[in-house]
Image (cartoon, rainbow, N blue to C red):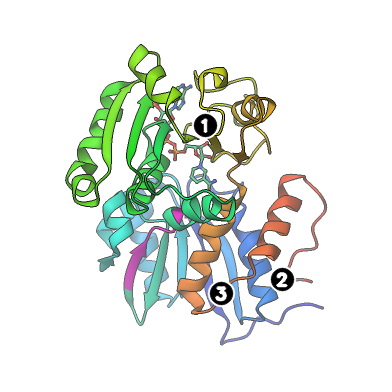
Amino acid sequence: MIKTITGTTQNLGVMGWPIAHSLSPAMQNAAIAAASVDAVYTAFAVEPQALALAVAGLRTLHFRGWNVTIPHKQAIMDALDEIDEDAAAIGAVNTVVNDGGRLKGYNTDVVGFLGGLRDAGFDPAEKNVVLLGAGGAARAALWGLMKSHAMRVTVGARHPEKAEALIDDFAARASMLGTKLAAMHWETEAFRGAFSHADLVVNVTPLGMTPHTDDKPPVDWREAKPDAFAYDIIYTPEETRFLHEAAALGHRTLNGEDMLVQQGAAAFELWFGRKADASVMKQTLRAQLSGAELVHPVLA
Ligand code: NAP
């Protein structure tokens, strides 16, 4: 059955550069179809210099909202009317909601990051955490861990000055929330010490992502606590070398699939005021990742 797009169909999408490989159109249209919402979600290739123009266009065209991905997550903040608390803390927006011409930016990566962990049965409260990497995803992860009252977060990176800049940005809020922060080069004795005391170790670098599946952050799981939890926010391959080595020693593991699905489900809820069918979104994501032939939800 072909979905009928009419004059009342709401428009949504994802903007990025490049955008061709985004999994969001398949996931969001699957959720839209499952909820029988009258909406359609597409992808927009927006060159960096055209961002302000693209935002003005979507506002003018009364788009209900859209997702934002690399390289626009920070730059778009200047073009919006309001930024929610999570997005302001992280310094990046991945979801925009258009309420009658007023654009508000959100960051649902935090919800995704924490939702995946929660569903895997791990509560970061009062825990020792090691974050491997100090980029954009590390900011969302760190904010989520602080909001969950992690006891200590040690950020390890190949460029310690970037890890230091990251924790400096969060220092004031961390002391209010009671989380201790540290930053160090990840190939030092001090870092090995932090790793050996960690309850949760999170890879927030692209190391190990397809096609470079032999890569991994420089940690040795034999030095970890026996019950340390391994979380890699990469979702291709399904099991990175980082997770494989942890699982081989009996550690609980989690990949980035649930984070991706749950950040999308949270965006759906912001646009439509109702829960998304996360299982349909996950099924669609899996089908996309495995390259299986997918009946496009718009046509299903
Ligand atoms: P980013 O802002 O570019 O940050 C990447 C971090 O990894 C930086 O600290 C960078 O260090 C480090 N890094 C990159 N290449 C490295 C290498 N060869 N050796 C050592 N360190 C390296 O990227 P991001 O947006 O944070 O994304 C990180 C990963 O998370 C990506 O794989 C992305 O696909 C994944 N992700 C997943 C989800 C999800 O929903 N599951 C959401 C967001 C991101 P330098 O600064 O020194 O380069």
Residue 90 position, x and y percent, is 31, 50
Quadrant the N terminus occupies: bottom right
Magenta-highlighted residues:
103-109
Q: Nearer the viewer, residue 66 or 251?
A: 251
Which residue is label 3 attached to? 275
Q: Helix, strand, or loop for circle 2? A: loop
Nearer-N-terminus badge (1/3)? 1
Q: Is residue 113 visible?
A: yes
Q: Which mark is residue 236?
A: none
Q: Earlier in the sequence, mark 3 or mark 2?
A: 3
Query: Residue at the spot x=55%, y=59% of the render?
Result: 262
Q: In screen coordinates, is 214 left or right of 96?
A: right
Residue type, label 1: Pro
- One can see residue 186 in this view: no
Label 1 and label 3: CA atoms lie apart by 30 Å
Residue 106 lies in magenta, yes or no?
yes
How far is the residue under mark 3 from the one under mark 2?
19 Å
Is label 1's Cβ within 8 Å of ligand 1?
A: yes
Q: Which residue is mark 1?
A: 206
Q: Amino acid at mark 3?
A: Lys
